Amino acid sequence: MNEGTIVKVSGPLVEAVGMDLVRMYDVVYVGKERLVGEVIRLYQDRASIQVYEDTSGIGPGDPVFPSGGPLMVELGPGLLSSIFDGIQRPLTLIAEKTGDFIRRGVSLSPLSREKRWEFSPLVKKGDVVSEGDIIGTVPETELVLHKILVPPGISGQVKEIKEGLFSVDQQIAAIEMKKGEHVLKLFSTWPVRQPRPYRKKLRPETPLVTGQRIVDTLFPIAKGGSAAIPGPFGSGKTVFLHQVAKWADSKVVVYIGCGERGNEMADVLLEFPHLKDPKTGRSLMERTVLIANTSNMPVAAREASIYTGITLAEYYRDMGYDVALIADSTSRWAEALREISGRMEEMPGEEGYPAYLGTRVAAFYERSGRVECLSSDERCGSLSVIGAVSPPGGDLNDPVVQMTLRTVKAFWSLDDQLAYQRHFPAINWLSSYSLYLENLDDFYSREISEEFSQLRNWCIGILSREAELKEIVRLIGTETLTISEKLLLDTARTLREDFLHQFAFDERDAYTTLRKQYLMLRAIYLFHRKAEEAISNGIPLNKILGMSVRDRLNQLRYVEEEDLNYFSVLEREILTSFESLIR
């Protein structure tokens, strides 16, 4: 294709003429150093290009070389345990080659062409396969079996199939189609801005269990669902997302550090390789892909990192796995959109963000879902998307927060006041919500207990009533409260401090199964109900709260998962203690 010529440079935005053969979102190479860029606007033969690298030294008259295709990612064995930047450059390999800083124009294949993988075919010569079918497997890590899929749009008869050790770019199979032969390798490519196809979207009916009690019990997210966690600086977003990444019952985790501070992203990169998968004891990185794009990296690559990450996540979803994608944070992504839009001199929307911000946010979160994959075996997979939002000053009226709330169905509102009180996770139970409760009630009733939903509603009711009573106490004092209302305040304190509060760095408290969450809540509810009966029989509140069994509620979080019979013993002790007190 004919090369273009640069006529204007404005930071990461470059304008070039002579680009009449390129299309929207085509990748081009800018300047003699061949910096990677993407076409984001076209007018006749003039193209606006966002460059994913520093444009210092680039000027009018420099050449632009079209690539002939959009921004693509490589999909194949070797993704797990890897660390990429926003446009899927392998940061570990670049560090080995050029040092700790990425030089401009450096380009390496995302997937190693030297490593060889053991391919085991599941089809034989003469079999008929269709798009999405599994033709073989590769043991990518000890935790994840990589399934080699027939790419979308390809179907026909297997003409050739091999077995043994192969690099990702070697031929492993050939499929005879009506329009010719299609060669399959261990890896394929896919444009990042185009969602990967599926047969149909299914209703999310299973919770994504995170082990965090305030989420799983009060504000759950379903597998295939979407959630947002906004909060101001210092409210614990990053630590909470680390907990979700570590403990969520998903097969694969894709973690995107989008525009975060370098020291925070460095902590992720240094900590994750040393974290152990709680279910197997293996390294957590064996089922994790990290995408690092810090705040000092080029702004355009920050915008692309979101699409790169979700395309990798969709690839593992299509294998039939449950995938969790964590984006920290989408506010930085929106700021990148705003900067590029401003340089293009587009009409600004609210607070300077582009008018199409809501469309972009919705398009990102809508790529989540539980789906029936393209295949002949009715395989299902799920992609859950959890995005952190960092509004300035914690203002939930920020356009990014509001646009996100219109799309997601679970909202975990972080509160800096709770964080200052050392209450973690600092999720405000009064302003958070989940729209998945109705979908998940059948699961909770079937797998945990038919009481689960009633106990959750009781818990939320107690906490809501506590907020009202605290306002009365603040205005008038405690003298106007009845004994029952004072009991309610004590129960609410137990729920806050001993159920909702969770210590991420204590092995016994960092993760709680759904069964244990239910038993903890039932024990607190039983004590409260028996205390109400005792008050109606004239027992003073100080005697009730002075019972030795009351102190046992403070230690429920430390009960080992292997010792849940403790709760049966505790419930009998609560009943006998109140019988003795009333008698």
Image (spheres, rainbow, N blue to C red):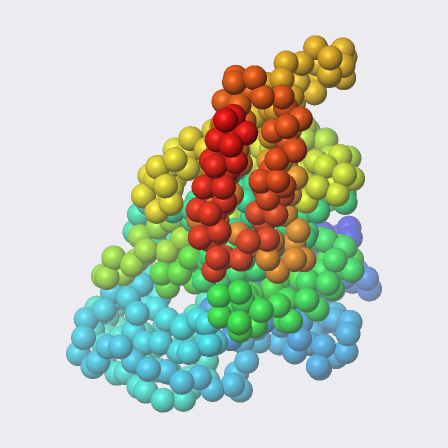
Answer left or right for 249 relative to 123: right
Give whichever of 511, 196 is nearer the camera.
Answer: 511
Residue 381, percent across and down?
Answer: 37, 56
Residue positioned 72% across, 77% down in the render = 95
Q: Is residue 366 visible?
A: no
Give whichever of 153, 526 is nearer the camera.
Answer: 526
Quadrant location of residue 442? top left
Answer left or right for 121 relative to 18: left
Residue positioned 60% across, 24% down in the render = 488
Residue 206, percent across and down?
Answer: 38, 47
Q: Residue furthest front?
A: 583
Image mark count? 0
Residue positioned 73% across, 16% down in the render = 478
Q: Is residue 264 visible?
A: yes
Compared to residue 306, the image places residue 376 above or below, namely below
Compared to residue 16, the image places residue 163 above or below, namely below
**Quarter of the figure that contains the N terminus:** bottom right
Compared to residue 498, the image places residue 48 above or below, namely below
Residue 127, percent across and down?
Answer: 18, 75
Residue positioned 48% across, 66% down in the render = 279
Give whichever of 149, 548 is nearer the camera.
Answer: 548
Residue 115, percent across and down?
Answer: 51, 85
